[in-house]
Image (cartoon, rainbow, N blue to C red):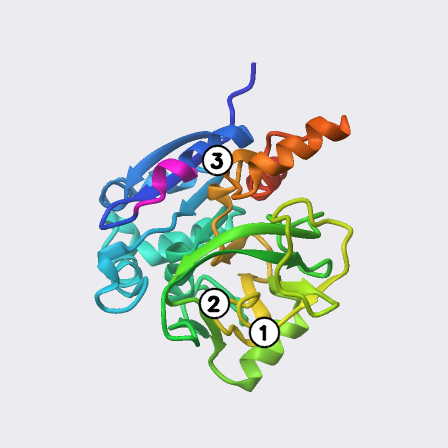
Amino acid sequence: MSKAPEALVLTGYGINCDYETLEACTLAGFSARRVHLNDVIGESGMLFRQKLVVFPGGFSYGDDLGSGVAFASKIRYAAAGQKGRLIDLFGEYVSKGGLVLGICNGFQILVRMGLIPALGGNHRDQEVTLAPNKEGYFIDRWVHLLASKDSPCVFTHGLGVFSLPVRHGEGRFLARDAAAMAGIERQGLIALRYCARSSGRTGGSSIGGSRGEDFSPTMDFPANPNGSDAAVAGLCDPSGRVFGLMPHPEAAVRFYQYPDWTRRGEEARRGGFHLSEEGEGLAIFRNAFAYVG
């Protein structure tokens, strides 16, 4: 029996969604484990045994210097044995075909490291940021998301409209300048956008099960919870193998994690149809597994 591909879920310094992310990776088929960032620094070869590296959500370093700033700086400047700095190892890991996923605080870390969007192929220069929410406060709600059919993103392949929760205070996507935004659009690097029903309604009685309905990207609050330019909810690099998103797929891997799960279960029972126990967030991890498995 072949060994399952390995996934590394980073932890330490305030990251607090590592256990849920570990479970999501395991459900998707990976042989996953939680590893403290210091252990990756101490054993540089560990990184290259992984098929997937995940930066989970949470509040690393308490967001004291801004979301993801301190964690990204540690990676940028930490020495990693004889191979230089840790950020160089991550660049090499990506160049050799590795997958990287950053969720919420993990997304914030990836953009500050420069791993995404990497417009010029250099996975070190910061070209975008995730600024404080436009409304000025922490947002905790479920949102509809629209996956781009033209994006090279491995993680969102084949997805349409689906729902995930967001919970952040700094998630407003902003590009460095107009040229950077044009490059992102031109290369199809916007993998996910916040969306709403084209009729203009931003809500709906059902959180999940939205595929097939008429949705389009929106700048309207609260469907776009943070005011992100171009309704950006998730971004990838040109290879499609490095992906960051503000919503939490690990918090929607089973249908009973949805706020309306009891009603949907009762509708399924009365209607005599099958309701999958999988949540829509699991598809992101399954796509990663399918790519490397």
Position of residue 257 relative to residue 222, above or below, is above
Q: Which residues are magenta?
A: 16-21
According to the image, label 2 marks what residue?
A: 122
Badge number at residue 24: 3
Q: Inspect the image, locate mark 2, and give the three-letter code of the amino acid beneath it.
A: Asn
Q: Is residue 287 visible?
A: yes
* Between marks 1 and 2 in the image, the one whose residue lies nearer the viewer: 1
Relative to 138, say whether 80 is above or below. above
- Quadrant of image for the C terminus: top right
Tell me the element at label 3. helix
Rendered location of residue 112, percent (x, y):
37, 67
Q: Is residue 265 left or right of residue 165?
A: right
Q: Which residue is depicted at the point 51% across and 21% down?
A: 3
At label 1, the amino acid type is Asp
Residue pointed to by mark 1: 220
Marks 3 and 2 sit apart, C-alpha to C-alpha, by: 30 Å
